[in-house]
Image (cartoon, rainbow, N blue to C red):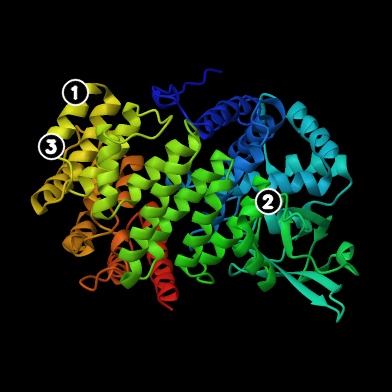
Amino acid sequence: GCVTFRDAYVFRTRPTEAQMEARANTILHELAHMWFGDLVTMKWWNDLWLNESFAEFMSHLALAEATKYTEGWTGFMVRKDWGLKQDQLPTTHPITAEIRDLADVEVNFDGITYAKGASVLRQLVSYVGRDAFFAGLHEYLTKHSYANATLDDLLTELAAASGRDLASWSKVWLEEAGVTLLRPVVTTAEDGTIERLEITQEAFSEGASLRPHRLGVAGYSLTEEGTLAQVFREELDVDGASTLVEAAAGIARPDFILVNDGDLGYAKVRLDEQSLAFAVANITKFTDSLTRGVVMASAWDMTRDGEMPARDYLNLALTSIPVEDSMSLLMLTLRHIDEAVRTFVAPQARADAAEDTGRRLLLLARTAASGSDAQRMLVAAAARNASSEEQFEAVRGLFDATQTLDGLDLDVDLKWDLLVSLVRGSVATESDIDALEAEDDTMTGHQNAAACRAARAGEWIKADVWDKVLTDTSIPNDTRWAMISGFWAQARTNPSAYATYVAEYFDALAGIWERFTFHTAEDLTTLLFPTALAGYTTEVDVVASGKAWIDAHADASAGTLRIIRELIDVCERQIANQAVDAG
């Protein structure tokens, strides 16, 4: 078969290691489709995951074991974060989804089909054993070569190879939606030894059954030298409401206990109170990137669930950055920092939190290793989060090269990152945009210029951008998305300026789906939704407006209704977390 890669994979400036790893993974993913999807194709779209989940799983396995990117499973945490987020929306669906029509197919190319499916396959490998898994897979591919197959065909071969009955496993993992939550419960004796360590499991999502998990549980303590050492580790089957960890019985209580050590499991994971306090105080002592990643994933999940205030998470995340040596996890942490400041911080505290975050990111950029990927990523993050006059001056100094960072390659892509920040802060002009666009006379350069022009403050500017992205069908889609990103540039600092667009958005929805193709309409519906305003202005109620639109448009397409329901849920979570952060 012929696989075509778009121009974005041909880097025009020096890529980070995370970008290189992601490109290698994409190449491997598409190569895996030669077997999963081409040699053997699912019989119907409800088994779409037999294509995409397998390609996702095999690409990360090959990445970790057959390329220089040996920490490929650490990078997988970025994808897993997507799957867990999607799985907690009200529109989540089983991995084997019901497909009624083409629209159902289109919307199910999502975090469940890709990331959750791949996570569950990783679970399945641990559950049946690696040798049995690949023996069964070999028989499946051999028997059904150049033909169509079903989930039952796959499970039959895996069961025969492993001797395990996979019917009940398939029911709870593949045929039910949602996620369960795992929590350690520690009972200690008077002398400080562990009497009992159990892992409790609860159905976090409505209707989700308790599931069998194969995963690691480990304990860590600080040594006299101040380093973190593993005290015990047991890989075991966690099933039902409670599972004992026998390896922990009788040992001195470690400083830190981690469920899902090694990140084999797919579940929401909590830390016990003592372990959470230890992690917050000692996150820089976690030198293994995967272990640190599991800790940070748990903290982020607690933040999303309103169990950790957003500003506490921000402090933990920013503290962890100096020791983060996985660029994939640094990218994920920076993404979560952006989201926390943009959506979860209490309205009355957001200006101060934004200023503190921008200041700390700028300091981290200045102290990062010369010429490192982290330096570049932190400069871009500091620009995205700049909020004070002093911070914008620093960004302007980097842009103009009147201030320099040793080893920083100020290439054209980074200059665009800096310029859109300066435009957002009203400290750059149209002439700055024109000059950089002339220097970068490429398709990407013109898209970045469109984003910058849309990022300028001003009522008439925003109105013009809004009108063009909704009515001008001649605009290339990538340029359209760039313009929308610029449109929302002042939403964090001046949300009231966007209040009138809530009604305009819902008035425009029907026309969007009539005028544009499915994917364009899907992206417009998502990117123009006024999520940024939820909880941050009293002039409009985004959630109520969304629910009213659904009530009035029960005959809208399933795809449209699904997107709006998901976005309403995002806003409700956002508002709830703002209240938690407010204390």
Establish if 29 lies above or below 486. above
- Quarter of the figure with residue 193: bottom right
Q: Amino acid at mark 3?
A: Glu
Q: Earlier in the sequence, mark 2 or mark 3?
A: 2
Q: Is any part of residue 477 visible from this angle?
A: no
Residue drawn at 70 percent across, 26 percent down? 66
Q: Residues within 10 Å of mark 2 (few under 14, many from 20)?
A: some
In this figure, which residue is indicated by the disc labeled 3?
Answer: 430
User: Residue 432 location, x and y as percent?
Assistant: 17, 34
User: Residue 520 location, x and y as percent?
Assistant: 32, 41
Q: Amino acid at mark 2?
A: Thr
The N terminus is located in which quarter? top right
* Labels 2 & 3 near each other (Cβ < 8 A): no
> Residue 519 or 43: which is nearer the viewer?
519
User: Residue 81 location, x and y as percent?
Assistant: 55, 51
Q: Residue furthest top?
A: 2
Separation of residues labelled 1 and 2 (CA atoms): 46 Å
In this figure, which residue is indicated by the disc labeled 1?
Answer: 438
Establish if 546 lies above or below 233. below
Q: Amino acid at mark 1?
A: Ala
Separation of residues labelled 2 and 3 (CA atoms): 47 Å
Separation of residues labelled 3 and 1 (CA atoms): 12 Å
Q: Is residue 54 left or right of residue 211?
A: left
In this figure, which residue is indicated by the disc labeled 2?
Answer: 291
Residue drawn at 47 percent across, 54 percent down? 336
